[in-house]
Image (spheres, coloured by chain):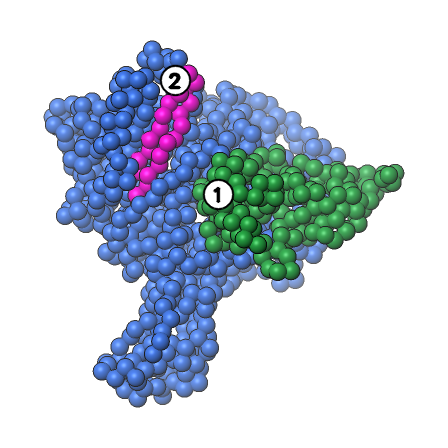
């Protein structure tokens, strides 16, 4: 059970514990604090970006218990007790995640602003569908907008990452 | 000796900048956090046109955590309520007398957190007296229309400019003598570059030193520094603009916006850093939109030859004329409208009007309005072919400027550098299987299916420009490059331009690699910090490669000239006896006697010839002798659903000739992106307004962007016609596809119905418009 809300500086606050990139983070937050601001401002994880404020563009996509969510449309308190993965948590002890390697190799990014959200959505797709068709990739990514690449190389990168993961 | 190939020009080198972006380690402006930083939030006008009777900020100012509430009245005390625009007009920083468009900045709250700032904005009470909104340039120019810019001395109507190019008399004569005249009236609607990162800044004026460090989303940091000095009266050496990683620009980050000015003024007055980060609605309703050109074009024809072109254009510039304009050209480079065709005479008449809409516009992935020009001529030539009953491809070929005509002087005064339009078109037609597709189209029609093939054979004009003729805000459009080779043979290249995703850190390193024989990963490219890079006008209008790319090649050659002197000293010979192969000087006829660029670099700091200064570095400011003229042919195949009017793209073939390609992988990425934005404009992107001036298209639920699902796949091809005046023969590629492709998409949809007499559909070509055309032709199912 969550503790009773406290009031700090006129705003309602509540303690939360969110496991971010496998590390539990306990903070006292305003109840209206968006998850994306919790990640960016409270924790300093600025790899997650904000592109639209209306759940349309997907730049703020993170994984919540492995499922892509748009962190601009979720409160930090809703993530209490859950696991969040951001772009900073993609690479592991053995180096870059195959999706990161593939985005670079296939020129799947230009300005880089959509890239973290795009990669996290793609990893969730590959988790549930290890060798997706082009159509499946395009459909899975359709909640993430890219203004630079025209998607063609992003689609190639996701297919390439699928191959890399299969070879592991 | 075994040598490793230098990965210079022509190599698809993987991008150096990607390492930070794929790991979330980039630094965009919203990632900048400074001690004591405050946050700015705007109150924006709900009305398109209203008089401001009063503004009560007391309740907002009383919110705990609010440090200041800034109004136009306060700015006026510091002479900052108005600022100059890039086209010599003025723009309100914060409204004082009236609001002139919905979304205009009225007041700003500076607070300890963005949440508190937003809360306080809600408490500002403004008493508005609504006025009639003007929502079209035609309405604006009607006699008796309310004057939007009544604060401007001598402004008695809503006209902004009248500007002409070409020869009116000769053009009228050509039309009088023509066999046939083909006419097209079309509207290139208002759209928005909408980079995924909105605009923003962190202004940090240090009260002790007086130094203003401004982190901002700027495509042109040096030009912005000078403008800040001129506008705010700050000494220029006390202004440092840092343009960090930028999340896309497409022209949106060229102008100076009120947010930058208010944040800087607030930091100066309060003595703490102030951050302004625009939200998406603010971005779409107040910052640089694009297009909004109402165009009338006429072609005079004799037989299958175009003998004249007449164009009238009326632009809707919103409440403040804030286009980026190269000096005298009031409609940018729109007069390039003769396109790829040898048209002996032309006359272009342009007018601009104020309306109660957001100011602008910028050129969305476009060199100063070449996009609108290209769209008009490519739509006109297709219609002319239909009227003559000839294939649009044959009609284009009959009228192309021929390779032997270059350098070519166009009827409106442009000096085309090089081109082979038919060759590019042939590559596209072959890739497409054009003849078979036309047969398939014919067969399909018999079965009741509607297939359309659209072509656009565009010519761009980019890389502005020769400084004597092209200036922005009086500044010559030149760019610089500074190269320092360190003792161990590693180098730093500093540029005046600024990438927003184009991959400068890789491409420009490859130019140095090619010229000096260093590997690209041994060269670090730095941009975007005005204290540490040479002066120049920045990245837009596809000008980085044509201008800073040339500066980079030439500074490398300057450094190599010094390296040669050092090599002669090291090899105890004369310079005349040396020859250069990538990365190494050797003695002619004695290749075993040689020295590498790395050894020369070390000697530059340890063992120079007597009388020579130490060091191996240089700087070069490049003033282009001319602009460059990339071109190509795009072909689109669509199929129309007769039940819904929806059109599906079956094929997109894009053949570009951008001269020499430095990094083919990056070039193709630029083309993919440009084609997608061209498709978006043709199919869905639209900023429109209701009769009261309310903006429709104020968020990504209303302003539609294509996702991976809607976006077609692209098939690319190339020809290479180097620019004769560019040091490495490159022309620039960032914008070709956005310039050329909208006409190809629209031509394709029109082509599917051309046999019914259809000659025009307005962008965005939505299903309902196509369905109405089907219904009129009796083809709707």
The kind of secondary structure element at disc 1 is helix
Span shown in magenta: B634-656
Whether the magenta-drawn stretch holds residue B651 is answered as yes
Is B771 placed above or below B241 here? Answer: above
How many numbered badges does the structure rendering display?
Answer: 2
Secondary structure mostly seen in the magenta stretch: strand
Q: Residue at x 64, y 57 (%)?
A: A92
Q: CA distance from mark 2 to mark 1?
A: 30 Å
| Residue B154 visible somewhere in the drawing | no
Q: Chain of mark 2?
A: B
Whether the magenta-drawn stretch holds residue B136 is answered as no
Q: Residue at x 69, y 56 (%)?
A: B35
Mark 2, residue position: B642
Judging depth in this view, the residue of B67 and A129 nearest the camera is: A129
Judging depth in this view, the residue of B604 and A4 nearest the camera is: A4
| Residue A81 visible somewhere in the drawing | yes
Report the chain shown in green. A
Judging depth in this view, the residue of B403 and B217 nearest the camera is: B403
Expressed as whole percent of the image width and height from the top left, the position of residue B95 reads 57, 35
Is B149 placed above or below A29 here? Answer: above
Please identify the quadrant where the N terminus of chain B is shown: bottom left
Q: Residue at x 34, y 44 (%)?
A: B716
Mark 1, residue position: A155
Q: Residue at x 77, y 51 (%)?
A: A24
């Amino acid at each position: 059970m969550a503790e009773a809300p406290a009031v700090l500086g006129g705003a309602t606050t509540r303690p939360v514990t969110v496991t971010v990139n496998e590390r539990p983070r306990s903070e006292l937050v305003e109840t209206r604090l968006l998850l994306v601001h919790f990640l960016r401002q409270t924790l300093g994880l600025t790899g997650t970006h904000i592109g639209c404020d209306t759940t349309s563009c997907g730049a703020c996509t993170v994984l919540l218990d492995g499922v892509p969510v748009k962190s601009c449309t979720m409160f930090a308190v809703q993530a209490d007790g859950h696991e969040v993965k951001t772009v900073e948590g993609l690479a592991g002890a053995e180096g870059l995640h195959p999706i990161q390697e593939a985005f670079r190799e296939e020129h799947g990014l230009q300005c880089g602003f959509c890239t973290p959200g795009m990669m996290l959505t793609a990893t969730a797709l590959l988790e549930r569908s290890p060798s997706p068709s082009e159509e499946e990739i395009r459909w899975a990514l359709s909640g993430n907008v890219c203004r630079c690449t025209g998607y063609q190389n992003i689609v190639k990168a996701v297919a390439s990452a699928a191959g890399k993961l299969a070879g592991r | 000796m075994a040598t490793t190939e230098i990965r210079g020009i022509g190599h698809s080198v993987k991008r150096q900048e990607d390492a930070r972006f794929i790991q979330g380690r980039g630094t965009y402006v919203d990632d900048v956090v400074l001690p004591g930083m405050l946050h700015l939030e705007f109150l924006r006008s709900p009305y398109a046109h209203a008089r401001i009777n009063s503004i009560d900020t007391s309740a907002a100012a009383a919110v705990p955590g609010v440090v200041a509430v800034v109004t136009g009245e306060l700015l006026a005390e510091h002479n900052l309520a108005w600022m100059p625009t890039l086209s010599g007009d003025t723009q309100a920083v914060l409204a004082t007398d009236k609001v002139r468009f919905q979304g205009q900045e009225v007041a700003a709250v500076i607070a300890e957190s963005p949440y508190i700032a937003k809360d306080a904005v809600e408490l500002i009470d403004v008493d508005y007296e609504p006025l009639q909104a003007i929502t079209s340039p035609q309405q604006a120019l009607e006699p008796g229309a309310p004057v939007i810019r009544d604060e401007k001395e001598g402004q008695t109507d809503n006209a902004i400019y009248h500007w002409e190019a070409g020869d009116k008399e000769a053009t009228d004569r050509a039309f009088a003598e023509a066999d046939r005249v083909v006419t097209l009236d079309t509207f290139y609607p208002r759209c928005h570059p909408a980079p995924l990162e909105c605009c923003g800044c962190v202004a940090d004026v240090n009260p002790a030193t007086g130094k203003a460090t401004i982190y901002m989303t700027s495509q042109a940091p040096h030009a912005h520094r000078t403008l800040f000095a001129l506008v705010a009266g700050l000494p220029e050496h006390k202004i440092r603009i840092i343009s960090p990683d930028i999340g896309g620009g497409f022209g949106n980050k060229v102008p100076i916006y009120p947010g930058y000015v208010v944040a800087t003024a607030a930091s100066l007055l309060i003595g703490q850093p102030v951050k302004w980060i625009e939200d998406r609605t603010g971005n779409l309703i107040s910052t640089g939109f694009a297009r909004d050109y109402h165009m009338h074009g006429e072609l005079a024809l004799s037989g299958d030859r175009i003998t004249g072109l007449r164009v009238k254009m009326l632009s809707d510039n919103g409440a403040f004329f804030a286009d980026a304009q190269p000096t005298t050209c009031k409609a940018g480079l729109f007069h390039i409208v003769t396109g790829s065709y040898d048209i002996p005479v032309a006359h272009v008449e342009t007018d601009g009007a104020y309306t109660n809409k957001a100011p602008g516009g910028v050129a969305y992935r476009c060199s100063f309005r070449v996009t609108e020009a290209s769209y008009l001529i490519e739509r006109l030539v297709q219609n002319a072919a239909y009227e003559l009953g000839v294939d649009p491809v044959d009609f284009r070929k009959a009228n192309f400027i021929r390779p032997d005509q270059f350098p070519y002087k166009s009827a409106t005064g442009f000096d085309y550098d090089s081109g082979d339009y038919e060759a590019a078109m042939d590559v596209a037609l072959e890739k497409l299987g054009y003849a078979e597709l036309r047969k398939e189209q014919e067969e399909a029609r018999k079965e009741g299916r509607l297939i359309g093939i659209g072509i656009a054979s565009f010519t761009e004009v980019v890389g502005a420009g020769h400084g004597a003729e092209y200036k922005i805000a009086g500044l010559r459009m030149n760019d610089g490059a500074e190269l320092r080779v360190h003792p161990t043979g590693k180098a730093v290249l500093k540029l005046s331009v600024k990438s927003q995703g184009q991959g400068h850190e890789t491409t420009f390193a490859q130019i140095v690699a090619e010229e000096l024989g260093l590997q690209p990963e041994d060269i670090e490219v730095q941009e975007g910090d005005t204290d540490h890079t040479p002066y120049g006008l920045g990245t837009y209008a596809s000008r980085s490669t044509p201008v800073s790319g040339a500066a980079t090649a030439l500074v490398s050659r300057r450094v190599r000239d010094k390296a040669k002197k050092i090599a002669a000293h090291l090899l105890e010979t004369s310079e005349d006896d040396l020859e250069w192969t990538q990365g190494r000087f050797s003695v002619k006829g004695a290749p075993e006697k040689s020295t590498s660029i790395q050894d020369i670099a070390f000697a530059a700091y340890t063992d120079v010839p007597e009388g020579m200064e130490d060091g191996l570095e240089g700087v070069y400011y490049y003033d282009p002798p001319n602009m460059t003229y990339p071109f190509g042919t795009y072909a689109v195949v669509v199929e129309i659903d007769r039940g819904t009017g929806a059109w599906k793209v079956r094929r997109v073939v894009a053949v570009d000739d951008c001269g020499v390609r430095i990094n083919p992988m990056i070039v193709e990425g630029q083309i993919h992106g440009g084609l997608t934005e061209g498709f978006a404009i043709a199919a869905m992107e639209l900023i429109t307004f209701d009769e009261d001036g309310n903006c429709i298209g104020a968020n990504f639920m209303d302003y539609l962007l294509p996702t991976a699902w809607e976006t077609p796949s692209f098939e690319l091809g190339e020809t290479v016609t180097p620019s004769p005046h560019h040091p490495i023969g490159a022309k620039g590629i960032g914008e070709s596809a956005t310039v050329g492709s909208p006409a190809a998409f629209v031509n394709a949809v029109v082509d599917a119905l051309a046999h019914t007499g259809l000659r025009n559909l307005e962008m965005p070509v939505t299903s309902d418009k196509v369905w109405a055309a089907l219904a009129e032709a009796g083809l709707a199912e």
